[in-house]
Amino acid sequence: MSKKRFSEIYWRNVLDPSYQNWLRLFKTASFQVHRAHLLMLFRQGVVSRDIVDSIKKALDKLERTFEFPAVLPNGVEDLYFILEQALGEEVGQENAAWLHTARSRNDMDTTIFRMVLKNEFRNLIQKLTAVCRAMELKAQHSEGLLTVLYTHGQPANPSTFAHYVMAIAQELADTAGYCLDALDDIDKSTMGAAAITGSGFPIDRAMVAQFLGFSAYAVNTYQAISTGHWLERPAQAVQLLMVDIGRCIADILHKASCEVGLIIFPDDLVQVSSIMPQKRNPVILEHVRIQASSIIDSCSAMLQHFRNVPFQDVNENADAPIAQFLDTLRKSVALLDLFEEAVLKMEPDTERAREISRQFGVTTTELADDMVRRTGVGFRVAHELCSIFVSSGSSFDVLRKEFNKKTGNTLPYDDDELRRILEPETFIRVRSVPGGPAQDGMKENYIELEKKVFALQRSVAESLERESAGIKSMMDGLSEI
């Protein structure tokens, strides 16, 4: 390694900040990569038992006791060269150099970055899964509580609060599935790719991937080092998640407005005005929206990092953007905490839902459908009649007169039966289609969400088990040397 001194400006703005990222985020994973590579070299007959044993013991000692400099010494490029120097002082420089056989900082770096990113991304998926599960419980406790659903900003159909909450949970569970797909892109070792073309030594890439808990290794050695998919696809998935959350928050804000008034928030999530005593501001929703927008911006920046960038080993794959993305993932988990708090504590105003149903005639869809089923009139005729009925201020007399005019027959409903058909509970009860708001329909909602949540939990558990088993296998193998 050259002992040249770097430009002070370059050292201060690039090399030392990179070193600080490594100390803070990647040091522990780097020791795991050293051990996995070392054991593989021994098992493949590349390095002798005596040298492997001495390096193994030195790595254990250095991880426990070595004090890395607080700042990067000028003239040293990164943490790796500091560690190699320290390792050389323990076992001799020539012996220490054996550890670097058949590898490069290129394949080490991207493997280490993926290890740390994989852990943070699993945390995000686990948190998102927990939110979906909590929303399912919220829905189950909200069965039968009336609300009104909107389309194009206007009252459309009555439904239940459980049905509404489950719609949001299903949306988030779908997006969690996209996050799981993105995790597959992260979950590939690049060790053995070396700089870009691999090595002439008889290495076993699958062995190292298994020791480090990866599901596989990136096969093409050039693509392994040059790809940005393991950063781009996770950024896209998180971006989509934040778009979903932003849309749900916008809808909840609409329903919580005084003009709509379908959702109420408890005092512990409401802030007041410093001058207007009547104000109850559910600003938690605004904070979720603000933070989601900020995370979307960060994810967009990650995607833009690779725009028109050569398909090569480049620093867009290096510690600085990855450190930023790791921070974005932690912010995403914190945002999900905030979102969960808001959703679990909001409650429907069922009387307001009933009032809106009457005021805007949102149950007349069922009246029109009932006419089609029971009187034999056509679908369009029935809906035209109900439109006239609503425009008349819900006059039963007008409805009967128009029905007779259109069909030549008498409308076969008395006032009590019309009122019963127009009740929100009737509207909901007959919509038992799978996924609908009726009790039978809600069963399908829960079954579908359970399937998604189970698949998410199983996949994350398998990833964690694979990692735990790989590390144990590696440590057991090293202990036998």
Image: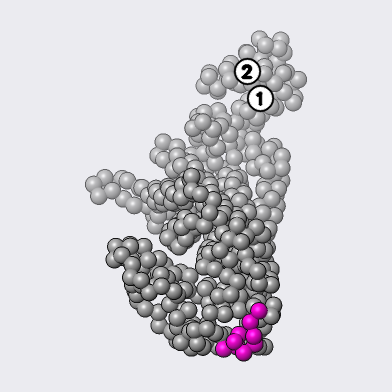
Within the image, what quadrant is residue 193 found in? bottom right
Within the image, what quadrant is residue 46 found in? bottom right
Q: Is residue 119 shown above or below 67?
A: above
Looking at the rendering, in which quadrant would you find the C terminus?
A: bottom right
Q: Which residue is drawn at 52% across and 39% down?
A: 353
Q: Mark 1 points at which residue?
A: 368
Q: How far from the left and from the top, in percent, is residue 127?
A: 54, 61
Which of the pair 194/165 is nearer the observer? 194
Q: Which of marks 1 and 2 is nearer the N terminus?
A: 1
Q: Which residue is drawn at 55% across and 22% down?
A: 390
Q: Is residue 353 visible?
A: yes
**Magenta residues (range):** 46-54
Q: How far from the left and from the top, in percent, is residue 33?
A: 57, 73
Q: Mark 2 points at which residue?
A: 385
Within the image, what quadrant is residue 194 found in? bottom right
Q: How far from the left and from the top, in percent, is residue 238?
A: 52, 52
Q: What residue type is labelled 1?
A: Ala
Q: Is residue 348 visible?
A: no
Distance of label 1 from label 2 (alpha carbons): 8 Å
Q: Residue at x 64, y 21 (%)?
A: 383
**Majority secondary structure of the magenta segment?**
helix
Q: Residue at x 45, y 37 (%)?
A: 260
Residue 47 part of the magenta segment: yes
Q: Which amino acid does label 2 sit on?
A: Leu
